[in-house]
Image (cartoon, rainbow, N blue to C red):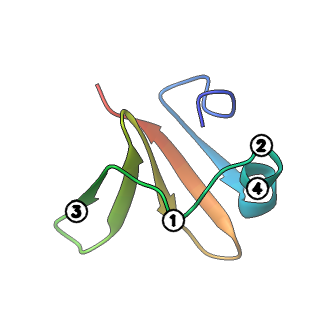
Amino acid sequence: MKSINTEQKTKTTRDKLLAKGFNFTYFTSLYTTKTGRVYYFVYDQGYLPLEDDYYAIVKRD
């Protein structure tokens, strides 16, 4: 995810993540927001599933 998320956050598609070899079944932690949205983290990089196969990618400090 680091190669896609060069800033603190970005938006990308599922296809772009898969093309980089991303494994959606592997994550190291979860973060649930107050509104019930779930971020899946792989160490300091996390993703949030959005609509239409888009994902928000964030970096945790």
Which mark is first along the chain, 3 or 2?
2
**Relative to 48, does residue 42 appear above or below in the rendering?**
above
The amino acid sitting under disc 1 is Thr
Which mark is first along the chain, 3 or 1?
1
Residue pictured at 56% horizontal, 62% vertical:
24
Which structural element holds mark 1? loop
Residue pictured at 39% horizontal, 57% vertical:
40
What separation in Å lies between label 1 and label 4 (alpha carbons)?
Answer: 12 Å
The image quadrant that residue 35 belongs to is: bottom left
The amino acid sitting under disc 3 is Thr
| Figure disc tally | 4
Whether pointer 2 and pointer 4 mark residues with C-beta atoms closer than 8 Å, the reply is: yes
Which mark is first along the chain, 1 or 2?
2
Q: Nearer the viewer, mark 3 or mark 4?
A: 4
For label 3, the residue is: 33
For label 4, the residue is: 18
Which structural element holds mark 3? loop
- Quadrant containing the C terminus is top left
**Relative to 21, does residue 4 appear above or below in the rendering?**
above
What separation in Å lies between label 1 and label 3 (alpha carbons)?
Answer: 20 Å
Q: Crowdedness of circle 3 by 10 Å Cα count: few (<14), some, many (20+)?
A: few
**Relative to 38, does residue 28 appear above or below in the rendering?**
above
The amino acid sitting under disc 2 is Lys
Rendered location of residue 27, percent (x, y): 41, 54
For label 2, the residue is: 20
Q: Which mark is residue 53?
A: none
